[in-house]
Amino acid sequence: MSKTSTNAGQSVTTRNGERIAIVAGLRTPFAKFATYFHGVPAVDLGKMVVNEMLVRNELDPKLVDQLVYGQVVQMPEAPNIAREIVLGTGMNVHTDAYSVSRACATSFQSTVNIAEAMMAGNISVGVAGGADSASVSPIGVSKKLARSLVDLQKTKTLGQKWNVLKKLGLKDLLPVPPAVAEYSTGLSMGQTAEQMAKTHGIKREDQDELAHRSHTNAAKSWEEGKLKDEVMTAYAEPYKGALEQDNNVRFDSRLESYAKLRPVFDKKHGSVTAANATPLTDGASAVLMMTESRAKELGYKPLGYIRSYAFSAIDVWEDMLMGPSYATPIALERAGMSLSDLTLIEMHEAFAAQTLANVKMFASDKFAKEKLGRDKATGEIDMDKFNVMGSSIAYGHPFAATGTRMITQMLNELNRRGGGTGLCTACAAGGLGAAMILETE
């Protein structure tokens, strides 16, 4: 059973009762690993999008009180990406900035941290977001080589150095890329997705259909111009032309083509393929946040407001990616809402298997009673409200950037539909989950 406190009746307001406003949001196009942003570190992607967001909204950078930003796969030379963004975008050098990491829910966390600073009365203008580059990752060395390099520093003679080096084999000299497995279990996310597919009876055909739907909806959103104002045109150095759209979206997606791919993680009995999972991606996103009165004072019309939020944590050995099913009922309870009250829902698609397993558990009374300690299910998701613009399988998933991508996309779509409330929810490594309910006027 989940032990997360519900904090029923959550009030996301300042001490004076002002709501926390999302004034603007922007992201770079998301690019597949080792394509357009190849060689561009996450810190540069973060600077790029934050600077462009401030310029577009004609906000003096020196008015930003605090910047909270995240990066999941951090570079040792820039461990505090948030501070580097402040220093690289013309903000006051005294602007407070710190970095956070909550795996795939990182920019939900940075957004909440800015909101909570406003709720405490400490700031009135803040920037939140996240960036990751799968193309620029810290490449390490083997444990044996690392130890030998330390031992070398203690040697003085050539003989002593040789005694250290002769113990190394060729395999010890090979570079070690960042691990894709959970530190605590050794299991990859893909292996967990396979487990969830088998445990919850998620068929390969249904996974492929969801992936096709995601690409189709994303392509339609691009073609209808829905994303043009929330995705900047990127110019990466060295200059090689501009990137205006996400380059993972399949504008010619055909359902029958998905069946041709072979499973990746369980080659004999598996169902998770490269096509029904999100790809390694480079990109950055950010949101500009203000207290309600500060936004009015500066002449901004907010995109919307944070109504409630919740985070969850569960076991990592089984169903590790079930975070949305745990976090969402808490966020709904804190907002005083039921699932059917929502206008739109977006669930981060780490894998089609994970997404469909969560959709299934939302509607399960058995899951609610046994895992959540609740009398009834969260509710059956109306698929006409679900991931209507596509999600991470289509757009890609720069780990720390996905949360604020979802927040901006949700609020813009709600406003196009005349307003309402929307749920953004995501699973994350380490058995973590996030859910946020947004509202418009």
Image (cartoon, grey):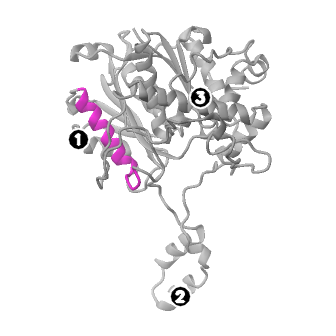
Pointer 3 residue: 213
Per the model, the C-alpha gap separating discs 2 and 1 is 48 Å
Q: Position of residue 23 (x, y in %)?
A: 33, 21
Image quadrant occupied by the N terminus: top right
The answer to whether residue 317 of the structure is visible from this angle is no
Mark 2, secondary structure of its residue: helix
**In terms of depth relative to the viewer, which is nearer, 354 or 145?**
354
Pointer 2 residue: 162
Mark 3, secondary structure of its residue: helix
- Amino acid carrying label 1: it is Val
Q: Position of residue 147 (x, y in %)?
A: 55, 71
- Amino acid carrying label 3: it is Arg
Q: How many marks?
A: 3
What numbered label is drawn on residue 93? 1
* 126 part of magenta stretch: no
Q: Earlier in the sequence, mark 2 or mark 1?
A: 1
Up the image or down, 410 lies above or below 92; here it is above
